[in-house]
Image (tube, grey):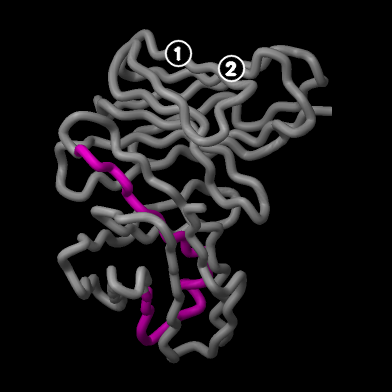
């Protein structure tokens, strides 16, 4: 069956360290992989997207890698801060025909990240 | 929240009653989606729309119907609510022809079926 797994349900790290979150998937061939942040009581907010032909993407303190052979993405937050505490969701875009139908995005269940001062 | 509103934000209803949730956008995006979010399951797609009057089922569509009579509004209806439909419901929009196809989410509706 098709699955997306975010390996840790929760991750606690010290402020200033690098947080690394993992997303693994099986039986998909996604064109894109996305990461979202979700704060309690709010909807997810888009952070980064990486394409299947890209190995790495950066945005400020965020870095995402995408290994289509391993079927894995890593999401890094460097110099982490307490304000980075949130749940982070991995999502796959599994559209096969991008110009003929809506993209279908499948979400992982998320990793709750806590940064302690 | 990228010009997306959901109403109501909270609702408590009894088993067997019909419920309609509304999603309204001011972004003129073509694609709209309804998700439910439950502990341990993450976000699961219920239905989506790729244009006015064009809708399709997602992975958990049983017990739900949708309608989209104009670009800005996407309605989700529970014909006869059950306790298993207690959840937080999120609407999302996307603009396929923009770089990345990311989705923008509304603030959510917390529905409790007693």
Q: Residue at x 47, y 64 (%)?
A: A88
Q: Decide: marks 2, 1 in contact (CB < 8 A)?
A: yes
Quarter-of-image position of residue A46: bottom left
* Residue range highlighted in magenta: A74-97
Residue B9 drawn above or below residue B102: above
Q: Label 2, label 1: how many angstroms apart (C-alpha)?
A: 8 Å
Callout 1 secondary element: strand
First in residue order: circle 2 vs circle 1: 1
Residue at mark 2: B77
Q: Count residues near mark 2 (Cα–Cα under 10 Å), then give few for <14, some for 14-19, many for 20+.
A: some
Closer to the camera in the image, B91 or A107? A107
Residue A96: mark in rendering: none
The subunit carrying tag 1 is B
Q: Say whether residue A110 is left or right of residue A31.
A: right
Chain letter for mark 2 = B
Q: Secondary structure at mark 2?
A: strand
Magenta stretch containing residue A93, yes or no? yes
Residue in view at x 36 percent, y 24 percent? B49
Same-chain status of marks 2 and 1:
yes
Q: Residues within 10 Å of mark 1 (few under 14, many from 20)?
A: some
Give the answer, above or below, for where B13 lies relative to A69.
Answer: above
Q: Residue at x 46, y 60 (%)?
A: A89
Vertical side of B25 occupied by A17: above or below:
below
Report x, y in % for residue B80: 72, 15
Q: Could you tell whether A57 is left or right of B89 in the image?
A: left
Residue on which disc 1 sits: B67
Residue at 36%, 26% (x, y): give it.
Answer: B25
Q: Quadrant of residue B56?
A: top left
């Amino acid at each position: 069956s098709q699955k997306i797994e975010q390996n840790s349900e929760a991750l606690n790290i010290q402020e200033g360290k690098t947080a690394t979150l993992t997303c693994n998937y099986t039986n998909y061939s996604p064109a894109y992989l996305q990461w979202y942040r979700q704060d309690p009581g709010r909807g997810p907010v888009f952070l980064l997207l990486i394409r299947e032909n890209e190995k790495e993407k950066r945005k400020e303190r965020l870095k995402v890698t995408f290994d289509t052979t391993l079927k894995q993405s890593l999401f890094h937050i460097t110099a982490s801060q307490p304000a980075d505490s949130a749940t982070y969701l991995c999502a796959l875009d599994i559209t096969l025909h991008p110009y003929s139908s809506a993209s279908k995005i499948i979400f992982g269940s998320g990793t709750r990240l806590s940064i302690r001062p | 929240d990228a010009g997306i509103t959901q109403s109501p934000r909270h609702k408590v209803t009894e088993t067997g009653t019909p419920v309609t949730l509304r999603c309204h956008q001011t972004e003129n995006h073509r694609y709209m989606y309804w998700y439910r979010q439950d502990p341990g399951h993450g976000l699961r797609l219920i239905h989506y729309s790729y244009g006015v009057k064009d809708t399709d089922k997602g992975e958990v569509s049983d017990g739900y119907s949708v309608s989209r009579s104009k670009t800005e509004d996407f309605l989700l209806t529970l014909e006869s609510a059950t306790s298993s439909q207690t959840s937080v419901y999120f609407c999302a929009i996307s603009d396929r022809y923009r770089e990345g196809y990311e989705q923008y989410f509304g603030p959510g509706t917390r529905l409790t079926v007693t």
